[in-house]
Amino acid sequence: MKEHELQHMDEEIRECIACPLSDSRDGAVPGEGPEDARVVFIGEAPGRQEEKEGRPFVGRAGSILNELLSSIDLARDEVYITNVVKCRPPDNRDPTVEEIAECREYLDREIDRIAPAVIVTLGRFAMQAMFRRYGIEAGSIGEERGTIHRVERDGRTLTLIPVYHPAAAIYDPKKKDVLLEDFRTLRRILDEER
Ligand code: URA
C-alpha cells in the first residue's frame, strides 16, 4: 500500500498544471505500487487506456509487461510502476524535453521515497532519465539493454537495468525474446540479492 507521502503526491499529480499536457489530458496517471517495493519499473508516458483508468500500463503494453513479470514469477502488486511523464501526450507522440523536465520532480521524489534496490527502465526515455540522474553516459537503447549498472547511493547499492519498452514487442517478436532474456537477468539479480 502507498503511504502518506506518495498518496499526497498522487493528488498533486492529478491537479498538476506545470506543462501544456494538463490542457489536453483526460486525467493524470500517477505511479502505482507499494512504497517499500524492491523494484521500480519506469515507462515513458501513459496511453489512452492508462489515461482512461488513471493507472499505468493497463493497455496493450501493460499486457506484455504483465506477461514479462509472470515469466519470472514477479507479482505486479509487489513492484512499483510509473512513467517519466504522468500525462498522455496528444496522439501518443513522444514527450518533449520540456514536458520531461517539468515532470522530473515527481519521478525523483518517487525514487527517493521508495529507495528501491533495482530500477528497470522501459524504453529509451526512462533510460535517458535514469542515466542522467546517476551520471551514466547513455548509448543507444539497442546497445544498453540488458546491461547492469551498479550505483552507490547513500551507502546502498542500486542496480539499474535498461530494457526495451514492452510496446516494442507488439510488432517485433524478436524484441519480445530479448525482453524475456532481460527479465531473466532481473530475476537472477533479485535472487542473488536476497
Ligand atoms: N506505455 C508507457 O510508457 N507507459 C504506460 O503507462 C503505458 C504505456
Image (tube, rainbow, N blue to C red):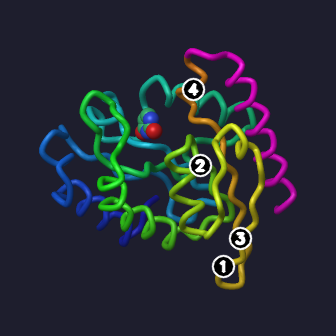
| Residue to which mark 3 is pinned | 151
Q: Separation of disc 2 and disc 1 at Cα?
A: 18 Å
- Is residue 134 or residue 176 the one in the foreground? 134
Q: Is residue 50 above or below residue 59?
A: below
- How many residues crowd around disc 3 within 10 Å: few (fewer than 14), some, or many (20 or more)? some
- Is residue 175 or residue 68 the one in the foreground? 175
Three-letter amino acid code at the position of disc 3: Val
Of the numbered discs 1 and 4, the one sitting upstream in the chain is 1
Where residue 126 appears, as percent x and y from the top left, is: 52, 50
Left-right relation of 164 to 159: left
Three-letter amino acid code at the position of disc 2: Thr
Q: Separation of disc 1 and disc 4 at Cα?
A: 31 Å
Pointers 2 and 1 in contact (CB under 8 A)?
Answer: no
Magenta region, residue range? 171-194
| Residue to which mark 4 is pinned | 168
The residue at label 3 has a CB less than 8 Å from ligand 1 = no
| Residue to which mark 2 is pinned | 121
